[in-house]
Image (cartoon, rainbow, N blue to C red):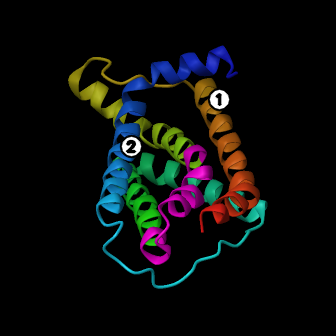
Amino acid sequence: MLHSGLLLLLKKNSKILLIAGFVWVFILILTIVSMLLQWNNFIPTKELYPESVPIFEIFQHNVMLAFSFILLGNATFGVLSMLVLLLNVYITSFAVYYVFIETGSFGFSVTVILTHGILEISAMIICFILSTFTMRLAINKMFNQQIFYLNNSKQKVTLLTFMITLFFLAAVIESQVSVRFSVLFL
């Protein structure tokens, strides 16, 4: 069970969580519906067999991208954060769709990406919260009221720790579980 302080912190950030979460869920649902509509209208072009990538390599890649995302997002008052969020959603949807088109397996395409993707997407949403601080601050000042919750330094460290933990768990699952589980659907 999550620490009650973390749950309260996530609740305080619910507006920004809902915005980012809605974008991810909406686009992924559209992707899955598109896949289901095309299920019988194509011939798979090749068989894809996932390969295991070392946990540390995945983890390091994701954390470095997240830190860049946080720094650049705040430097651009959240503009880059919005663009990177949309790009990540597009890449996730494209990956699921591409694997489906190439293999013809709905189960494989969803499990190879989403078994670890749920945690990775959650970590990216936390990253989105951290990368939009300057944007939320500017909006609050512009309207002279608290539209968005602003995290203090201690809360940012808590969110950062949670994000890194999610990235580590996602890397373990991507490296060890996704590969083994998804081949059951080929």
Residue 54 appears left or right of 28: right
Quarter containing the C terminus = bottom right
* 142 part of magenta stretch: no
**Residue kind at label 1, given as amino acid type:** Thr
Hey, what amino acid is under mark 2?
Answer: Val
The N terminus: image quadrant: top right
Q: Is residue 140 above or below residue 185?
A: above
Q: Main secondary structure of the magenta part?
A: helix
The residue where tag 1 is placed is 158
The structure residue drawn at horizontal position 46% and vertical position 54%, both measured from the top left corner, is 72
Up the image or down, 128 lies above or below 141; here it is below
**x%, y% of residue 32?**
37, 55
Q: Does residue 101 lie above or below 60 as drawn?
A: below
SS at mark 1 in the image: helix
Please name the residue shown 73% across and 55% down the image.
Answer: 177
Q: Which residue is mark 2?
A: 25
Which span is picked out in magenta? 99-119
Residue lying furthest bottom in this view?
45
Please report the residue visible at 53 percent of the width from the left and 58 percent of the height from the top: 107
Where is residue 115? Give x, y as percent: 61, 51
